[in-house]
Image: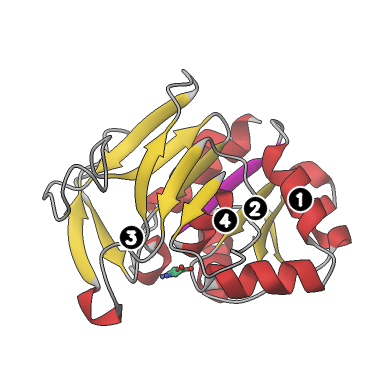
């Protein structure tokens, strides 16, 4: 199977099964769960799922995958989509980490604040309008979601969507309530698109990013 035809989903922890099932249903790519360097290197695209970023980071370090993930996420010729915890791992900096912090993969020029909307009970859903997606807003499910604090003014970076409501004040999100961002072939969403039956963001990732690298 050629590298150009395989998309992986990082399968160390979290909602990886859901992403795999959706990718299989909407694309002709070979879809694999990634747990080793060899599996990662066989992919042209990768989804880093939601879950617990500290756990994923720890498992990645202990299994010797961290270096290869960093390389993959900073390679301009790979497509990566991080959702929720996956977005935290794609950031260059994350606040609210425990003492010692977690090791991030990096890849996007942004700073995120973990768990900034509050605890599990403060999880919420909201309809999010996306300019790049036809057919009306996407229902976003936010579970102990991070907030995008800031991102560089690099012209490769585009905002894909923002929260219509303003649940937090300006000091927490000085660049607005951006919940989906794209930087060249990397994208991130602060919510969980794999938990709804709406697969349009998966289609966007495959058609607009993976297909074009
Ligand atoms: N739903 C999620 O992915 C939660 C992310 C989690 N709060 C973290 O910090 O990693």
Residue name at image x 54 percent, y 75 percent: 14
Residue named by callout 3: 198
- Disc 4 or disc 1, which is closer to the eye? 4
Left/right placement of residue 82 relative to residue 144 reads right
Left/right placement of residue 39 relative to residue 78 reads right
Left/right placement of residue 51 relative to residue 37 reads left
Q: Which residue lies furthest to the right in this view?
A: 38
Residue named by callout 4: 89
Residues at circles 2 and 1 in contact by the CB criterion of under 8 Å? yes
Label 4 Cα neighbours within 10 Å, binned few <14 / some 14-19 / many ≥20:
many
Label 1 Cα neighbours within 10 Å, binned few <14 / some 14-19 / many ≥20:
many
- Disc 1 or disc 3, which is closer to the eye? 1
Residue named by callout 2: 46
Task: Check if residue 122 falls in the magenta segment.
Answer: no
For residue 43, the mark is 1
Q: How far apart are marks 4 and 1 (CA)?
A: 18 Å
Residues in magenta, as a range: 78-83
Position in image of residue 55 (x %, y %): 61, 75
Q: Distance between the residues labelled 2 and 1?
A: 7 Å
Question: Can I make out residue 198 in this image?
Answer: yes
Residue 173's place in the image compared with 34, above or below, is above
- Element at badge 1? loop
Residue name at image x 46 percent, y 47 percent: 188
Q: Which residue lies furthest to the top in this view?
A: 155
Residue name at image x 52 percent, y 39 percent: 207
């Amino acid at each position: 199977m050629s590298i150009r035809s395989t998309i992986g989903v990082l399968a160390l922890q979290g909602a990886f099964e859901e992403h795999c099932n959706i990718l299989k249903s909407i694309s002709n790519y070979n879809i694999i769960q990634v747990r080793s360097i060899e599996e990662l290197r066989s992919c042209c695209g990768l989804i880093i799922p939601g879950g617990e970023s500290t756990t994923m980071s720890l498992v990645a370090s202990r299994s010797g995958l961290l270096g290869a993930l960093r390389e993959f996420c900073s390679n301009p010729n790979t497509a990566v989509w991080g959702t929720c915890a996956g977005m935290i791992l794609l950031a260059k900096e994350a606040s609210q980490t425990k003492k010692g912090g977690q090791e991030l993969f990096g890849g996007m020029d942004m700073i995120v604040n973990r768990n900034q909307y509050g605890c599990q009970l403060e999880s919420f859903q909201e309809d999010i309008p996306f300019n790049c997606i036809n057919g009306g807003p996407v229902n976003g499910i936010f579970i102990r979601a991070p907030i995008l604090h800031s991102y560089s003014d690099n012209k490769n970076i585009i905002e894909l969507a923002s929260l219509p409501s303003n649940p937090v004040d300006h000091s927490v999100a000085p660049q607005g309530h951006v919940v989906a961002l794209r930087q060249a072939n990397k994208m991130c969403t602060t919510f969980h698109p794999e938990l709804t039956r709406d697969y349009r963001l998966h289609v966007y990732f495959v058609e607009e990013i993976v297909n074009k690298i």
